Amino acid sequence: MNKKQQRLIAQFYASLDETTTSELTSEQQKSIERAIIATGLGSNNKVDIRKSISIFNKRYFFVFLLGRDFRQQLRNESPFAVFIMTLLIALGVLSLFSLAVVTLYLIKSALGIDIFPNFSFGIWDWFKELIHIA
């Protein structure tokens, strides 16, 4: 048992009532300690930041973990769910890219920059009509 696990087990016993702790048999204590270590209640992550903030008599928790995934069981995700998630991410990225291009085009048009003489996509005219700019 490493120091981190020992500290975690000590914190666990410190949080229990003294009467409850004294009533545990050595076999029960060993079982509890094995369960704490097995369930990974102690974090093995390189970065483990856990903070709580009280705002208006309510507590909010912030947890940031960064490290390798040591879990033995992999999540079973259906191929359909993976496909839908990939599709949604791709559509989101494409939408953000398109919005950025249109925004840059509108800024260019508002500044009066004419890249191709006598050619317009009509987006600037539509936008001016939409917000009633003369």
Image: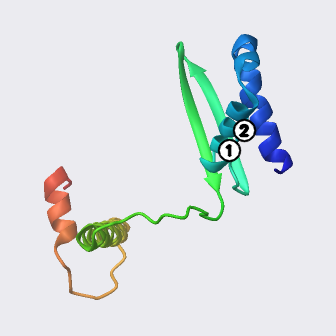
User: Do labels 1 and 2 touch, CB within 8 Å?
Assistant: yes
Secondary structure at numbered mark 1: helix
Q: Quadrant of residue 16?
A: top right
Residue at 30%, 67% in the rendered image: 85
Q: Is residue 101 above or below residue 119?
A: above
Question: 10 Å neighbourhood of mark 1: few (<14), some, or many (≥20)?
Answer: few
Res 107 seen here:
yes
Kindly identify the amino acid type of the residue bearing the numbered disc 1: Arg
Residue at 70%, 54% in the rendered image: 44
Kindly identify the amino acid type of the residue bearing the numbered disc 2: Lys
Residue tagged 2: 30
Secondary structure at numbered mark 2: helix
Q: Nearer the viewer, residue 105 or 99?
A: 99
Residue tagged 1: 34
Q: Farthest residue toward the right?
A: 3
Question: 10 Å neighbourhood of mark 2: few (<14), some, or many (≥20)?
Answer: few
Q: CA distance from mark 1 to mark 2?
A: 6 Å
Q: Position of residue 10 (x, y in %)?
A: 80, 32
* Disc ID at residue 129: none
Q: Nearer the viewer, residue 64 or 89?
A: 64
Residue at 33%, 68% in the rendered image: 89
Describe residue 111's horizontal placement relative to residue 27 as left or right: left
